[in-house]
Image (tube, helix red, strand yellow):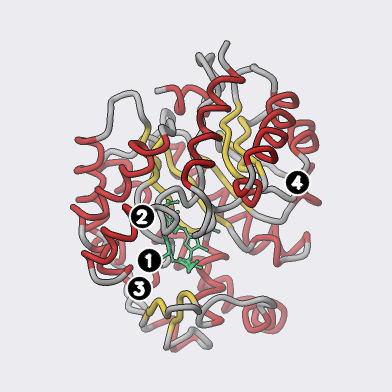
Amino acid sequence: MIFVDACLKKQTPYTPIWMMRQAGRYLPEYRATRAQAGDFMSLCRNAELACEVTLQPIDILGVDAAILFSDILVIPAEMGMDLEFVKGKGPVFHDPLRNEADLKRLADDSDEKLSYVYDAIKLIRKDLAADKALIGFAGSPWTLATYMIEGGGSKTYEISKKMLYSNPSLLHAILRKNTDAIIKYLLKQIDAGVNAVQVFDSWGGALEESAFFEFSWSYMKEISAAIKAQHPEIPVILFSKGISGYLDKIDGTFDVFGVDWGTPIEKAKAAVFDRYAIQGNMEPTRLYSQEKIKEGVEHIVKVMGKEPGHIFNLGHGMLPDLPVENAKYLVDLVHELTRR
Ligand code: CP3
């Protein structure tokens, strides 16, 4: 698989590409399947329909890897938290975690309750072409904790960060619970058939340097080390958004460093490419203009060259209203410009 080879810094015929949030509302086919499922969580819990939307961007865009269709918030939902996706607002937990008693109520067997995810993986791996990789994923312990503590998305993360500075042992206990659940969940995704895993730390950048390494990166590293110890052949991708100031301190046992769009790719290359493969990092809103896509791709390809160890991606997720033909244009352009 070209994608897996690139993650392991092996030679490939061209630079593989996939896009974060490649299955989603910008595809009319996705909107039709979600309507059939009823709502977003029902889509996540329906293995056949989750398989269908996972495969849509492979067929439509020609990307080199599929990412399992699910959400990072299925773990807290299966720990027993009351999750609702509110139209126009995003995810809401009606019972946020604020104290030790709230934490004690959470179930320890979310990895077992997530069996619908493993069922979806088995179906996808059966239907996906043998040369295309299937990426499994989870949210990072910290990013999940922000949703669990705030009760939804946040601009300031004030409740989580107040806990970080005033009751750090409670935050560590929450992160411990999430880390244990994530490791069990990702190992079961691998047993079901995924070919690589990515940990999404979307809100790592909400933390100052010392807090980032203590409350987010240390747990991400623990997850990747646990997976690599059991499955050295499975690439692990770590993606923390908003941490370009701390690149020189990135360490740990993993394969691919996911670069966000706010980090100049040459800086990421200088800081980590001697140790890790690099994934990224075109600014996602360039997808609104083919001219700007071309400019973005040419720059990234010039910096990363045709050496092994680059996976092309966006520097964060796709947006719901972008033109499908531009996403297709991006995939074809990356393949064309990087052919060895
Ligand atoms: O990448 C993929 O195609 C795979 C599927 C995937 C989804 N969410 C589907 C989804 C993945 C990998 C995620 C990860 C995820 N979910 C993250 C980390 C990645 C990132 O973007 O930083 C986060 C922070 C979440 C939490 C989440 N889920 C939010 C904030 C929202 C609302 C977003 C919005 O724009 O309304 C979701 C819902 C969600 N997850 C949608 C999709 C396709 C939209 C749901 C819909 O309306 O159909």
Distance between the alpha carbons at the discs numbered 3 and 1: 5 Å
On whether ligand 1 comes within 8 Å of the CB at mark 1, the answer is: no
Q: Residue 28 carries which label?
A: 2
Badge 4 marks a residue whose secondary structure is loop
Q: Which mark is residue 263?
A: 4
Distance between the alpha carbons at the discs numbered 4 and 3: 32 Å
The answer to whether residue 193 is above or below residue 144 is above
Say which label, 2 or 3, has the lower sequence index.
2
Q: Are marks 3 and 1 in contact (CB under 8 Å)?
A: yes
- Under mark 2, the amino acid is Pro
* Disc 1 target residue: 75
Residue located at (52% from left, 24% from top): 6
Q: Are marks 4 and 1 in contact (CB under 8 Å)?
A: no
Residue located at (35% from left, 57% from top): 70
- Under mark 4, the amino acid is Thr
Badge 1 marks a residue whose secondary structure is helix
Distance between the alpha carbons at the discs numbered 4 and 2: 32 Å
Q: Which mark is residue 77?
A: 3
Say which label, 2 or 1, has the lower sequence index.
2
Count of picture labels: 4
On whether ligand 1 comes within 8 Å of the CB at mark 3, the answer is: no
Of badges 2 and 3, nearer the viewer stands 2
Q: Position of residue 209 (x, y in %)?
A: 78, 59
Quarter assignment of residue 25: bottom left
- Label 4 CA crowd tier, 10 Å (few <14, some 14–19, many 20+): many
- Under mark 1, the amino acid is Ile
Q: Position of residue 213 (x, y in %)?
A: 70, 57
**Viewer-side residue, 87 vs 103:** 87
